[in-house]
């Protein structure tokens, strides 16, 4: 029988199981007696074995079977789950991931599994030198979930029957959809919105009440379609978050540090496009936290802290933003030391030392070429830096903020939009150029009275509340010919550039609208200060500026 | 560039002929309307709406030979695998089947180049991937001259 048509489904389901297995192993290492997790891990290995066998991927089936055997002994209380078992099972998970990737790439899913299979089969835990009191473990592994059969499959008892019946409606209501189809759906919805905007322009010119009514109805329907399509694209943070405990565990082992890691808010949903791009920045921040943020066990004990460092990832949802906070209780960062390092590297002038706020000093670590790591380790200090983390977030329409207290720890606050494709923008005109700002990046718009503008040397400022905000010419930033602003007031867009508020002076405000923001392809994707483009209702092409990277 | 191309587009610009791999060209257009690109060098005529995507229009003669940018002529839209870019040339002459020469020392802006035999001529084959890489590098280096390109909205000619 030709099974190739089921290959994509196999790969997709196998990856889900393997992600779950990695997470379960790490969880069991923390709480070896957690019967539910033991059963979950057993069931996933069992399912993978069955899937591999039915698709005739024999090495996948055999390796999963060896892992299932080990878990069988743990589940039956013969062995207690220990860190050696965790290492073996994680090694198995990694090898299975490699085999599944081989299948995905068109291979046979075959690999060198003999050695690991043999080690899994030969594994036996060290005789347990138990508890301080020398008593047998209090927490015996309870029998498997009574709703499951011996091998983890659904049993046929009454209770199980009800359970299956309860689960059926959900399984019938969900289908797997290729991610490409979801991308096409949002693209088509965006094009429809662009065309609706075009029709609105034409309707205004024609002055037809009937057409106006029809377009208003079309707008309502499109809003509904847009909302539904966005919902379809949403995925829980768990889709990337489930891999983090494993990653932190490996990093901790490598650095010889003890780490207690936790995640909250894994159920919160974000656009899959954002989640795909978020994985690397998150891992980089976590690497830094383990490698540089947390002290060694000895340093922590000397500082009166618990031996194990704590790293947490908290995901929470605001009105139209998702906030991801990565915290550690490590050594924290000293703003004065960061400023000194920036001056030493020529990234900051000596005369600016006193002008840098605490917040700006912490953001210095996001400056290209900045690193205070005394030595490069193989965990971090190589590869992407915090500058890449920040620019990745900015390209997603998000922001990064850093809080830190020396001796107490650091917090990295990532703020992200729920969706990326269709965004509200502010259009402004500068000479012959019309450009857009994402509304999320605009702190406010203002018409500054000319007689309130202050002069400090070569700089012009205006007072907004208690703050003096510099005026920056958008003409100059765009490389446009100088064009003096006439009139009693100066229109400006207040934005944040590298942690400081600035008022970008424009010729005039054009208006606001929702647009389908398109990423720029090669070569325009290399333009600094521009995050994307859009087509307006009249067919005009506008570019969307990213204020934080304009200067 | 690999030797897999066997069909080439022969185009004229700046009074010379140039060959382009046909499978790297997605579309040929005779009319276009552009809008200004912020901070773009002068050899860009602006950006056009190509099937809903903002697409920069590069005047090939202005880029390669420093000619004054022109908004007439023909546009070649590159395949998206190569880049999101349209090239303004004078005109498309014809499509030919040919075997490109081996890589050899270049006479123009590239260190090496290949040629295509056509009417007893050896026509330079433009390496589009290299071209896009050069344009990317240009943006990475930042603006080197005042903004001029796409300064006015150009209507369909």
Image: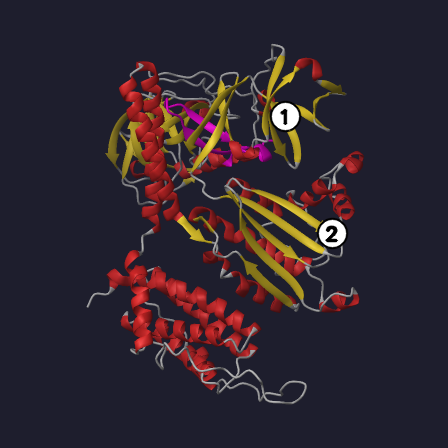
Q: Position of residue A186 (x, y in %)?
A: 36, 41
Residue at 29%, 18% in the rendered image: A209
Coordinates of residue A52 in the picture (x, y in percent): 32, 71
The foreground one among A248 and B74 is A248
Q: Residue at x 40, y 66 (%)?
A: A17
Q: How is the image coloured?
A: secondary structure
Q: Residue pushed farthest top?
A: A487
Q: Left or right: where does residue A456 sit relative to residue B79?
A: right
Q: Chain of mark 2?
A: A
Of A254 and A497, the residue lying toward us: A497
Mark 2 lies on a secondary structure that is strand
Q: Badge 2, how many Cα within 10 Å: few under 14, some, many 20+?
A: some
Q: Are marks 1 and 2 on the same chain?
A: yes
Q: Earlier in the sequence, mark 1 or mark 2?
A: 2
- Going by the image, does A217 lie left or right of A141? left
Where does the image place residue A75, in percent across and percent down from the top left? Answer: 45, 81
Confirm whether the magenta stretch covers residue A549: yes
Disc ID at residue A405: 2
Whether residue A64 is situated above or below residue A522 in the rendered picture: below
Q: CA distance from mark 1 to mark 2?
A: 31 Å
Q: Nearer the viewer, residue A265 or A18?
A: A265
Give the extent of the magenta segment: A526-551
Q: Is residue A530 above or below residue A447?
A: below
Marking on residue A503? 1
Query: What residue sits 37% from the left and 27% below the top?
Result: B49
| Left-right relation of B69 to A293 | left
- Residue A167's image quarter? bottom left
Q: Is residue A241 above or below residue B40?
A: below
Q: Chain of mark 1?
A: A
Magenta region includes residue A412: no
């Amino acid at each position: 029988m030709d099974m190739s048509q089921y290959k994509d489904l196999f790969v997709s389901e196998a990856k889900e199981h393997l992600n779950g297995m990695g997470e379960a192993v790490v969880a069991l290492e923390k709480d070896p007696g957690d019967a539910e997790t033991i059963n979950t891990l057993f069931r996933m290995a069992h399912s993978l074995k069955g899937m591999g066998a039915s698709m005739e991927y024999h090495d996948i089936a055999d390796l999963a079977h060896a892992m299932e055997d080990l878990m069988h002994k743990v589940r039956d209380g013969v062995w207690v789950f220990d860190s050696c078992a965790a290492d073996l099972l994680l090694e198995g998970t990694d090898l299975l991931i490699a085999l599944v990737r081989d299948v995905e790439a068109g291979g046979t899913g075959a690999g060198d599994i003999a050695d690991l299979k043999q080690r899994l089969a030969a594994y036996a835990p060290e005789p347990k030198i138990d508890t301080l009191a020398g008593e047998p473990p209090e927490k015996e592994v309870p029998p498997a979930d009574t709703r499951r059969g011996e091998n983890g499959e659904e049993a046929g008892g009454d209770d199980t029957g009800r359970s299956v019946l309860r689960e059926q409606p959900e399984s019938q209501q969900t289908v797997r959809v290729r991610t490409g189809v979801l991308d096409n759906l949002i693209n088509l919805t965006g094009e429809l919105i662009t065309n609706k905007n075009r029709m609105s322009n034409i309707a205004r010119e024609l002055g037809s009440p009937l057409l106006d009514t029809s377009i208003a109805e079309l707008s309502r329907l499109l809003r509904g379609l847009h909302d539904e399509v966005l919902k379809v694209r949403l995925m829980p943070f768990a889709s990337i978050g489930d891999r983090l405990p494993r990653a932190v565990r490996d990093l901790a082992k490598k650095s010889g540090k003890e780490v207690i890691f936790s995640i909250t808010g894994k159920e919160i949903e974000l656009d899959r496009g954002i989640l795909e791009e978020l994985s690397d920045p998150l891992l980089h921040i976590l690497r830094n936290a383990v490698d540089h943020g947390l002290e060694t066990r000895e340093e922590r004990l000397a500082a009166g802290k618990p031996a194990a460092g704590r790293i947490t990832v908290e995901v929470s949802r605001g009105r139209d933003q998702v906030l991801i906070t990565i915290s550690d209780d490590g050594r924290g960062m000293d703003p004065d030391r960061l400023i000194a390092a920036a001056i030493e590297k020529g990234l900051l002038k000596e005369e600016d030392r006193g002008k840098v706020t605490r917040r700006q000093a912490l953001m210095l670590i996001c400056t290209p070429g900045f690193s205070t790591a005394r030595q490069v380790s193989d965990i971090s200090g190589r590869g992407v830096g915090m500058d890449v983390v920040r620019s990745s977030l900015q390209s997603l329409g998000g922001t990064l903020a850093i809080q830190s207290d020396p001796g107490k720890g650091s917090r990295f606050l990532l703020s992200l939009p729920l969706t990326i494709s269709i965004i509200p923008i502010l259009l402004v005109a500068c000479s012959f150029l019309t450009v857009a700002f994402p509304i999320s990046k605009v702190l406010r718009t203002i018409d500054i009275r000319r007689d309130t503008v202050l002069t400090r040397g070569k700089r012009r400022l205006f007072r907004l509340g208690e703050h003096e905000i510099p005026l920056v010419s958008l003409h100059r930033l765009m490389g446009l010919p100088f064009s003096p602003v006439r009139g009693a007031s100066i229109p400006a867009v207040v934005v944040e550039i590298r942690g400081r508020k600035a008022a970008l002076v424009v010729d005039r405000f054009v208006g606001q609208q929702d647009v389908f923001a398109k990423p720029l392809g090669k070569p325009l994707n290399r333009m600094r200060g521009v995050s994307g483009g859009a087509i307006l209702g009249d067919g005009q092409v506008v570019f969307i500026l990213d204020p934080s990277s304009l200067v | 560039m690999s030797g897999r191309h066997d069909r080439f587009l022969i185009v004229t610009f700046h009074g010379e002929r140039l060959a382009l791999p046909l499978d790297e060209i997605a579309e040929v257009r005779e009319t276009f309307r552009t809008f200004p690109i912020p901070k773009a060098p002068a050899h860009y005529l602006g950006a056009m709406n190509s099937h809903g995507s903002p697409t920069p229009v590069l005047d090939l003669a202005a880029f390669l030979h420093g000619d004054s940018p022109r908004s007439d002529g023909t546009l070649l839209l590159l395949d998206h695998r190569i880049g999101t870019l349209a090239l303004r040339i004078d005109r498309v002459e014809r499509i030919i089947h040919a075997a490109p020469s081996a890589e050899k020392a270049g006479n123009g802006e590239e260190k090496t180049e290949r040629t295509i035999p056509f009417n007893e001529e050896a026509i330079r084959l433009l390496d589009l991937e290299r071209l896009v890489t050069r344009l990317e590098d240009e943006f990475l280096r930042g603006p080197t001259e005042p903004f001029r390109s796409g300064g006015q909205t150009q209507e369909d000619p």
